[in-house]
Image (tube, rainbow, N blue to C red):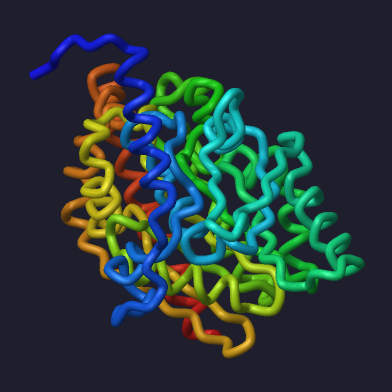
Amino acid sequence: ALVMQISGEEMEKQKKNYAALQNLKTEKDTPFGTDAPKGLQFKDCYFGFSGACGGCGETPYIRLATTLFGDRMVIANATGCSSIYGGSYPSCPYLKDEKGRGPAWANSLFEDNAEFGLGIKIGSKYSSKQDESVWIIGGDGWAYDIGYGGLDHVLNSKENVNILVLDTEVYSNTGGQASKSTPRGAMVKFANSGKKTQKKDLVALAIASKNCYVAQVSLGANMVQCIKAFKEAESFNGPSLIVAYSPCVNHGFDMSETTTEMRKAVECGYWSLVRFNPESGELSIDSTSDFDKYDNFLSGESRFSAIKELKGAEAEELLSKSKEDAKIRLETLKTLAKKQ
């Protein structure tokens, strides 16, 4: 299937082909809206080829955000996977359109990304341009752990910023160590015999403030709900938080099945789809949970299945508690929904 060619000759030909491709104009007027994937495929994409792992669960969310808002986005990116594939030399996956517009991107220290993004937003008030869409992006190691104090401060402010948490449930960039997002029973670094404590409920904590828009999404489970959440978050005049389920190589499954894994996580109740708007007081649970599928979901990922071989009965107890934790998180959301 492959034919050996003189690289210099082939490169020159492909450069011309690429230049011709770059000159193609994106179709602006289509009969399709942008509330579903069909319509979004006709819009400019401002996130191209990254150096992320094959099947990475984080990059689709960044692609979605930049497709919707990329011509006016300003991104504050916490150190982590998203800063490595987002800004590594010598290439950058962020793109510009034929008018030269595209996301402005900067990387902060791990611990202060929320404050960094807040400063960008406050500083933009003194700019002649007032149509920026400020996005604070990072992983769960930043949002749940090291940068949580700053995150909580921003969520309880009145500044119009959007926070996207790419939740892999581990410190992915440094090799898969446990974070406060890691669920009970997961076998990860720093919890080699299974994490003994439950996953921190960041979504419930944010909803309890009644100050910020909050959504929990899983793109492979419900693309329309995810798109809707991103649009609602960006249009909300105040802080917003989107927690996005992001499968990772550290989970231990076939990464060509990332989208399917996202769907399975929601179907079994491991992950719930949620939207909360404090202005209307409406809390919508956009998914149903069949907990009879929960054990099969855990068995399909080595971070959970491996502990069974190592710890036996103790592992079964941990994973049973993990299931109860998921049920409690869902019941907490239902209780909050009744109180709104």
| Residue 331 vs residue 182, the one in the foreground | 182
Where the N terminus falls, by quadrant? top left
**In the visual, does 254 lie left or right of 47?**
left
Q: Which of the 4 quarters of the picture holds residue 240?
A: bottom right
Residue in view at x 42 percent, y 41 percent: 19
Residue in view at x 67 percent, y 65 percent: 133
| Residue 227 vs residue 128, the one in the foreground | 128
Q: Which of the 4 quarters of the picture holds residue 69?
A: bottom right
Residue 333, position as x, y percentages in the image: 46, 70
Q: Can residue 314 be seen in this view?
A: no
- Name, please, the residue furthest toward the bottom: 280
Where the C terminus falls, by quadrant? bottom right
Q: Which of the 4 quarters of the picture holds residue 156?
A: bottom right
**In the visual, does 317 lie left or right of 329?**
left
Residue 11, position as x, y percentages in the image: 36, 21
Residue 103, position as x, y percentages in the image: 62, 53
| Placement of 71 over or under 104, stated as above or below | below
| Placement of 94 over or under 216, stated as above or below | above
| Placement of 2 over or under 324, stated as above or below | above
Residue 312, position as x, y percentages in the image: 25, 23
Residue in view at x 55 percent, y 29 percent: 91
